[in-house]
Amino acid sequence: QVQLVESGGGLVQPGGSLRLSCTASGSLFSIYTMGWYRQAPGRQRELAATITSGGTTNYADSAKARFTISRDNAKNTVYLQMSSLKPEDTAVYYCNAHFRPVVGPPYDYWGQGTQVTVFS
């Protein structure tokens, strides 16, 4: 079992920046693909960005050039640096840890979410 704790959400004006952090429990953090997903009111949860154990990143089109995902395996922490924020970035942001073993179903763990509100 992996516990994920997010922090760093808050209120910001359009064009501003925020950095989200997610710290995981346990000793296997480095093997997980870590991701940030977001869910706006009335909408489905969607991908923002992921980073594999090897450091390969993937971004939603809406996040490219504005968001940067990174990880620090020594601190069991994944970050999402968000800049040039827009009102449409307003959502609850969730941290995800994903691992697909060679045999058996994948593992997915979720944090409790942190609210990001972009307002003018």
Image (cartoon, grey):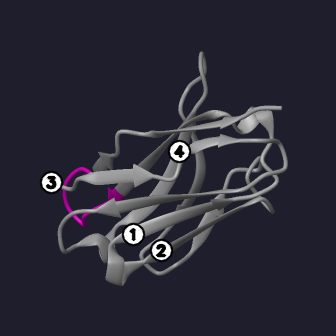
Which secondary structure is most common in the magenta stretch?
loop
Residue 1 shows which numbered tag? 3
63 or 10: which is nearer to us? 10
The answer to if 79 sits in the magenta stretch is no
Q: Is residue 45 left or right of residue 111?
A: right
User: Mark 1 packing: few (<14 Cα in 10 Å), some, or many (20+)?
Assistant: many
Asked whether the residues under the numbered discs 1 and 2 touch, taking CB atoms below 8 Å apart as contact, a structural biologist would say yes
Q: Nearer the viewer, residue 103 or 15?
A: 15
In the picture, the quarter occupied by the N terminus is bottom left
Distance of label 3 from label 1 (alpha carbons): 16 Å
Tell which tag, 3 or 1, sits nearer the viewer: 1
Residue depicted at 76% across the width and 33% down the height: 88
The amino acid sitting under disc 4 is Tyr
Residue at mark 1? 77
Where residue 54 appears, x then y in whole percent? Answer: 46, 81
Q: Nearer the viewer, mark 4 or mark 1?
A: 1
Q: Earlier in the sequence, mark 1 or mark 2?
A: 2
The 10 Å Cα crowd at callout 4, few under 14, some 14 to 19, many 20 or more, is: some
User: How far is disc 2 from disc 4 in space, using C-alphas?
Assistant: 15 Å
Q: Which residue is mark 2?
A: 71
Mark 2 and mark 4 residues within 8 Å of each other at the beta carbon: no
Q: Amino acid at mark 1?
A: Thr
**SS at circle 2:** strand
Crowdedness of circle 2 by 10 Å Cα count: few (<14), some, many (20+)?
Answer: many
Q: Residue at x 78, y 41 (%)?
A: 13
Residue 35, position as x, y percentages in the image = 48, 56
Q: Name the spot of residue 25 as percent of width and height, x first.
A: 21, 63
The Cα–Cα distance between marks 3 and 2, rounded to whole angstroms, is 20 Å
Question: In terms of sequence position, does the residue under pointer 2 or pointer 4 come before the other?
Answer: 4
What residue is disc 4 on? Answer: 37
Position of 78 with respect to 11 (left or right) is left
